[in-house]
Amino acid sequence: MFEAAKVGRSVSKSDFKAQRDELRTQLLEAQRELTDSHIPVIVIIAGVEAAGKGEVVNSLNEWLDTRGVQTFAFWDFSDEERERPRYWRFWRTLPPRGEIAILFGGWYLAPIEHRFRGECDDAALDSELARIVDFERSLTHDGALVVKFWFHLSEEDQKNRLKELSRDDRSRWKMLPKKSKFTEQYQLFEYVAERVIRQTDRGIAPWYLIEAEDKRYRDLTVGKTLLQAIRARMQQPLPTEPPATAEPLDLPESASAQITLLDQLDLSQQLSRDAYKEELKKYQREINELAWKAYKQQRTTVLVFEGVDAGGKGGAIRRITSAVDARLYRTIPIAAPTDEEKAHHYLWRFWRHLPRAGHIIIYDRSWYGRVLVERVEGFAAEDEWRRAYAEINEFEEQLVENGAVLLKFWLQVSEEEQLQRFQDREKTPYKQYKITDEDWRNREKWPQYKIAVNEMIARTSTEYAPWTLVEGNDKQFARIKVMKTVCERLRDTLGDDSSAIPGSGIARCGYKAVESD
Amino acid sequence: MFEAAKVGRSVSKSDFKAQRDELRTQLLEAQRELTDSHIPVIVIIAGVEAAGKGEVVNSLNEWLDTRGVQTFAFWDFSDEERERPRYWRFWRTLPPRGEIAILFGGWYLAPIEHRFRGECDDAALDSELARIVDFERSLTHDGALVVKFWFHLSEEDQKNRLKELSRDDRSRWKMLPKKSKFTEQYQLFEYVAERVIRQTDRGIAPWYLIEAEDKRYRDLTVGKTLLQAIRARMQQPLPTEPPATAEPLDLPESASAQITLLDQLDLSQQLSRDAYKEELKKYQREINELAWKAYKQQRTTVLVFEGVDAGGKGGAIRRITSAVDARLYRTIPIAAPTDEEKAHHYLWRFWRHLPRAGHIIIYDRSWYGRVLVERVEGFAAEDEWRRAYAEINEFEEQLVENGAVLLKFWLQVSEEEQLQRFQDREKTPYKQYKITDEDWRNREKWPQYKIAVNEMIARTSTEYAPWTLVEGNDKQFARIKVMKTVCERLRDTLGDDSSAIPGSGIARCGYKAVESD
């Protein structure tokens, strides 16, 4: 694969100057057009050590308008990063639409390094690469342009550069072959690199191999390639994908589609006032203890509440929060996104607010809005909400991998019960703020929501993050079912031993489990 | 002081229920009005241990609409927090306008704890309290409502609560008197608390003492007090302050005002092409080494570039960045604030992007926009930009306290030189994006800018963060002066010993120096 990057291309000094000035003007022009577009640009800078990646980025910084370009290097994890799923650090760096982020290594750095050092095998590497492909697909489908550069040096060239370096300089690189084992390690690195490139070189996010021996050729080629990629991307409104093959979605006329999981719920289930009081007391006491235990074990608990309007989400949430120390939980009500949030991938705002380890975080509505209200109201295009299922599963998998306990509740009430609650809200002064015209409008779309909910549950109820359907006509029954489910799950997970180590125990290339303190 | 909080107030269960429902309705109404206002609300929850602060917050969370309320507790510093000035963690939690943040302890927690434990003396505590007063003044002047609650228990009551607690529970509090020394430690805590409250109880951010023995009385009183505070604040457009006593500002007609520091610069200074090349090479090599050294010592370098349009900021910045590894620096061009930024104090966006330790961060324009363009164009009211000098000095002091090296450059050129550069920019293709109609308009305000710059330098050139005025008519001279200043300052600061410990060495109550690794 790398033969093509070892042919000794070069550019003379005078050619360089002439080409550079023209390129610079064109890059600035492309960047200006980009600013008004909906395209975030992600540039990955990777390759062999000592290829001059830092110099390339300096050239780009010089040629581009620095307003709208940010560069990120990924050093050791901070503890804030360690306490969150590992892609959190990358989500932090994703540019808003119209801007450019230059990432050193990005999500490729850790897997390559781990494989190079023999800390994982090919299978583990491959599985991580599959995740990367998913991630990049998700970004490009959202409109991003992902441009990946791989800088190559021949064994001879790398050896020569190494000679020029002082001992001190050498310590800056983690994957530089050691003098004594040069050939062996150079070949290992090339093997790993080829595997990585081959598996992640997709049409939507291609790799560009750059011969790095001649600095002028190297920098010019990067600049021109980036320019062409931006121009090409601006022509194409969105990267094309084969159309979804599943059935069309809004089919309330199809009778079979209407029999959903929700229809199978026994909404008549009830709990007596006395039994409720007793159970509530019991579980509130337990959840208070479990919250402290989880804090000590640095286990994050994520509770997602979705449900029909007036389904009792707020009441169920308050029964939990009123029992837990206010320092240990946070409720995140999902409202309209801010401007900054709108300028990013729709999952960005959820990544953004992930808490540090050890807390209970409660989402009052969540990322599932994408496949519920956004689908039903047509705010998201079909391919957008269709691919959201996989994106959400991936997101939740990362949460769980990082040690989080994730529980999702769907609170369902009958149409009649909802009507009564709406009317009750209109009558009670401190509940009036909860009822709006929108609620009444949503009610008319009951059949469409039913289908969307059914598909959501079918596609996103995973082993690591199952949905719990809650029969909500009787509020007391619903609240206890929620409390009980949370307590049981936490009890099982936290165990008797307060020194348990968090993390799902899934070994992955590029991934290190959170250490307990 | 605390006698008033020991009189045994209580509320019966039936009274509580009746009052609570009414209060809840009123709080929700006030909160709704708040949403449309420009007021961020900051609620501080502090007081003796075991007073039930967590329970109070749970009640508030239950009564308020959770959309628009966030609660924050401050546990041990994360390394990301330690690597930044210590108020960074508080700035992270400040609510946008129209929303409420409830802070456990907030900026009061660390000073009280340190003084209680005997880790600092009264003088150090007082100095920290003075900073707090400044900080709260800055927030309230910006429109915030700051409501501070202090929960009190008599010695007897605290003792009784302690009896009810298991050993495990007790470990949750850091400032609970030990059984054996109860009276002594209770009195010490009361002494510290009184000192803190007395010095920070200002009209613009008053303390409310709450008797915490009876839980119903306690929660109701907090709710009512908060309600009244919000209502009162909504009546008043902005907290009033005595008018500034300094002279009026835009006085280009006064001859004496026109002789400024800038007039004393010898703009004719030059550097020959050869001398420039040689010096540039020398300093670029040095700055490259110094950047790595600073990284190893985890010293942050902050470089602020301000100057007249076409003063050569960009060129000077590029001479630095092209010499430094792209992984070690970040350029932050200050453009228009985002919506989220606009919803906060004007310094918020600068706090927000403070880098982790060890990097060079370069501001292409900065927080000084407040006293330059915002002043001259009238975007900031007079009292806003007037108080900005002190706010900026305070901000910079914190940066330096945390170990940052802070250098500020003002790049000056003559009016004639600027004209030539403008014309040059219009002719050169890749420079055209740099010149806009606004630049031409700004040029007409040269005299006003001169006065603003002069005052800015006079008021914000501090010992710990001095301004360097750069004579910029000759670009080569200017660039070398900047490089040289940076190198000299870094060389002095970093010393020969790479194991030096960062931090300014200023001991402050509530402040722990960054540890070196």
Image: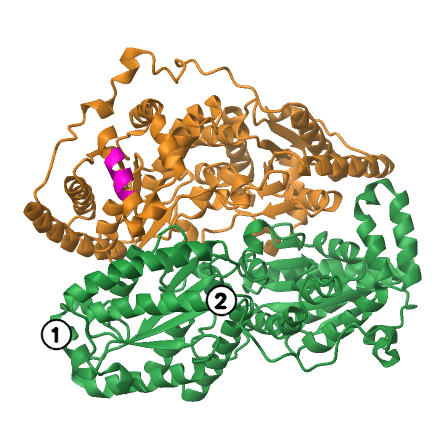
Chain colours: A green, B orange
User: Disc 2 on helix, strand or loop?
Assistant: helix
Q: Toward the viewer: B144 or A3?
A: A3
User: Disc 1 on helix, strand or loop?
Assistant: helix
Tag 2: Cα neighbours inside 10 Å, few (<14), some, or many (≥20)? Answer: few
Chain containing the residue with disc 2: A
Residue A87 screen position, x and y as percent: 49, 67
Residue B425 screen position, x and y as percent: 29, 44
Residue drawn at the location 56% of the way across and 48% of the way down: B73
- Please indicate whether residue A240 sits to the left or right of residue B432 in the image: right
- Please indicate whether residue B391 sits to the left or right of residue A467 in the image: left
Residue B46 screen position, x and y as percent: 58, 38
Q: Which residue is mark 1?
A: A163
The stretch drawn in magenta includes residue A178: no
Tag 1: Cα neighbours inside 10 Å, few (<14), some, or many (≥20)? Answer: few
Does residue A49 sit above or below B506 in this rendering? below
Does residue B202 sit above or below A11 in this rendering? above
For the residue marked with disc 2, what is the amino acid?
Gln
Q: Which residues are magenta?
A: B418-425
Q: Which residue is mark 2?
A: A235
The secondary structure that most of the magenta stretch takes on is helix
Q: Toward the viewer: A341 or A81?
A: A341
Name the mark nearer the viewer: 2 or 1. Answer: 2
Residue drawn at the location 83% of the way across and 45% of the way down: A431
Q: Is residue B341 visible?
A: yes
